[in-house]
Amino acid sequence: MPDANTLWLFALASLVLVLIPGPAVVYILTRSVSQGRTAGLVSAVGINAGSIVHVLAAVLGLSVILAQSATAFALIKWAGVAYLAWIGVRTLRGGDTMFNNQTRERLALKRVFVQGALVNILNPKVAIFFLAFLPQFVNVDAPNPALQTFVLGMTLVIVGLASDSAYALVGGHVGNLFRTKPRAGRNIRIGAGVTYLALAGVAAIAGARSSPAS
């Protein structure tokens, strides 16, 4: 187990990092604005469920493989880019009844959760982050470094869930304001679709520039 000082320092550093908006935050805000606070909170849970996968990967050493293998890195990068682009196209082609079809919204929550998890799982920057940031707080001379890695990783997940939930609540409030305006569904749908496509483009460019050597 990490000592108390290390744990508090890591939690503080994690809070600073998760407050910086990135693809996960944009996804959560988009879901909150387009479908309400419940969908935003579900997407936040999904995002952090994806983070748990990276925690387990860090414990098992998968993050090291991703950092050292250009092929593995590229495969996951392009899978993430393709998935964001697919969400964008599907959103642009969707209907404008997201605000008045409550049954459809409840059924879509499972999809919102899965999409949130995949957005984070398929983001190679998250894996690299766990490799570059988390190990700095692990004392390899202390017993059971794997347990330390797991505890620190779950600390980051808890901090991230709190921060992402706050973003979801803010997005839900914005969504409530948009519900009172004409053509809100169409405008938000188009904005969400364009946002996802832009994220796919940014991810492709950033990933191409930061691909590790094989």
Image (tube, rainbow, N blue to C red):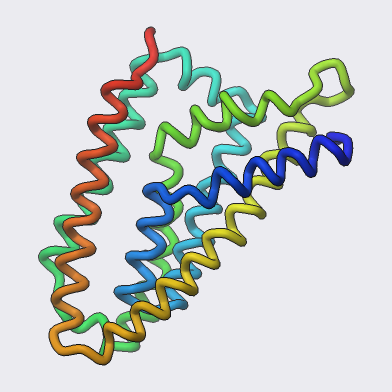
* Residue at point 40%, 38% (across, down): 123
* Residue at point 50%, 70% (across, down): 41
Above or below, comparing residue 145 to residue 102 in the picture: above
x and y percentages locating residue 138 in the rendered image:
75, 26
Q: Is residue 138 left or right of residue 92?
A: right
Q: Specify the quadrant of the image occupied by residue 183.
A: bottom left
* Residue at point 19%, 50% (across, down): 197
* Residue at point 43%, 33% (across, down): 125
Above or below, comparing residue 147 to residue 34 in the picture: above
x and y percentages locating residue 168 in the rendered image:
47, 69
- Tell me the quadrant of the picture where the C terminus can be found: top left
x and y percentages locating residue 126 in the rendered image:
48, 36
- Tell me the quadrant of the picture where the N terminus can be found: top right
Tell which of 23 and 45 is nearer to you.
23
Q: Is residue 195 left or right of residue 75?
A: left
Residue most toward the top?
214
Above or below, comparing residue 189 to residue 59 in the picture: below
Tell which of 5 and 147 is nearer to you.
5
x and y percentages locating residue 30 in the rendered image:
33, 65
